[in-house]
């Protein structure tokens, strides 16, 4: 059994150093369990972590990979889909055999059935060992938008207006961003044995403050991670800039070896 339940806050000077720390944590887990089941967020933030996995030239081929969410309506070959992005940027370059890859599809006819089937497969492989997360400016994790049920499972979810604006960059305009997604639920995410959440840049500073130092509330879905026993939150200085206890978190991370962590 793991002792010392914690939400650990890791603040690094830059985005690249933040990704390096997250990569080191992930590698430690992979060394313990080469067949580790990894849940993958897409979006901009984890790109540096995935690049490190590819550039390390290590073999991650025995691991099993799940994605966290997908835009509903996008086919698997659509380059804007999370599925295509993960294949292009991570799973293809890592040469992961198809039998170890389980990605939600956005073009399914019956998303509710697909969601239930996804939960069954996660269960069948023994659950997610490590879940990589980003966080939206509105506090979403996966596409669990503010107001999502804290016990939710994989399901369709309507994207909120802030998310449409934030993802307009990969579509021609906010109007073209799909209105629906399929996403692991908050309950699903909380069952992962370890969570690595990454956030960078000033635009995330407010939400990180509310997620780490505010109340647990469905209005900031990421705040529910305060209830999880093994979460590491990797931040660059900008994303950490509104944390009231910034210096405290830094001191803890630098000195945790003293208490055997
Ligand atoms: C994407 C996902 C989202 C993103 C969030 C932040 O798979 O789950 O929750 O993590 O929207 O996106 P970026 O990293 O682009 O700021």
Image (spheres, rainbow, N blue to C red):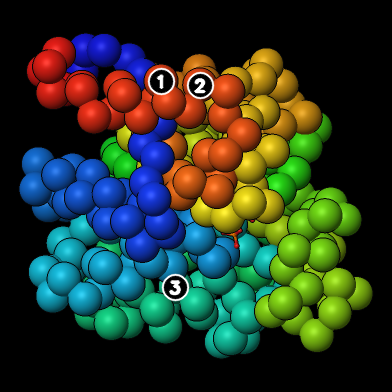
Name the front one of labels 1 and 3.
Answer: 1
Residue 201 image point, x, y percent: 58, 55
Q: Position of residue 134 (x, y in %)?
A: 53, 50
The location of residue 108, given as percent across then percent down, is 66, 69
Q: Nearer the viewer, residue 124 or 231?
A: 231
Residue underneath mark 1: 248
**Mark 3 or 2, which is nearer the eye?**
2
Task: Identify the residue under disc 2.
Answer: 245
The spot of residue 5 in percent (x, y) is: 32, 15
**Circles 3 and 2: CB atoms closer than 8 Å:** no
Q: Which residue is drawn at 71% across and 32% down?
A: 220
Q: In which quarter of the image is residue 216?
A: top right
Nearest the camera: 241 or 177?
241
Q: At numbered mark 2, what does the secondary structure look like: helix, strand or loop?
A: loop
Which quadrant of the figure contains the N terminus?
A: top left
Gap between marks 1 and 3 measured at Cα? 36 Å
Element at label 1: helix
- Residue 139 - label: none
Q: Residue sitting at 77 percent across and 57 percent down?
A: 163
CB of residue at label 1: within 8 Å of ligand 1? Answer: no
**Counting other residues with Cα less than 10 Å from the Cα at mark 1, is it few (<14), some (14-19), or many (20 or more)?**
few
**Ligand 1 in which quarter:** bottom right
Q: At 9% across and 41% down in the image, what residue appears?
A: 32
Q: Mark 3 points at which residue?
A: 86
């Amino acid at each position: 059994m793991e002792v010392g339940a914690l939400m650990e806050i890791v603040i690094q000077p830059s985005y690249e150093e933040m990704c390096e720390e997250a990569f080191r944590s992930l590698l430690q887990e992979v060394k313990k369990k080469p067949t580790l089941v990894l849940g993958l967020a897409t979006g901009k933030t984890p790109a540096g972590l995935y690049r490190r996995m590819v550039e390390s030239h290590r073999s991650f081929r025995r691991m099993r990979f799940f994605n966290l969410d997908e835009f509903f309506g996008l086919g698997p070959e659509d380059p804007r889909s999370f599925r295509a992005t993960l294949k292009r940027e991570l799973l293809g370059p890592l040469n992961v055999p198809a039998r170890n890859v389980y990605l939600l599809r956005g073009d399914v006819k019956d998303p509710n059935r697909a969601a239930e089937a996804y939960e069954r497969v996660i269960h069948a492989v023994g659950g997610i060992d490590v879940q990589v997360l980003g966080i939206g400016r509105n506090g979403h994790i996966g596409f669990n938008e503010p107001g999502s049920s804290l016990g939710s499972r994989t399901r369709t979810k309507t994207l909120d207006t802030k998310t449409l604006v934030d993802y307009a960059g990969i579509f021609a305009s906010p109007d073209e961003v799909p209105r629906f997604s399929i996403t692991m639920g908050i309950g699903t995410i909380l069952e992962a044995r370890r969570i690595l959440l990454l956030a960078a840049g000033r635009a995330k500073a407010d939400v990180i403050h509310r997620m780490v130092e505010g109340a647990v509330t469905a209005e900031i879905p990421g705040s529910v991670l305060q209830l999880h026993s093994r979460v590491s939150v990797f931040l660059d200085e900008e994303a950490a800039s509104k944390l009231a206890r910034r210096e405290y978190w830094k001191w803890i991370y630098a000195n945790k070896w003293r208490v055997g962590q």
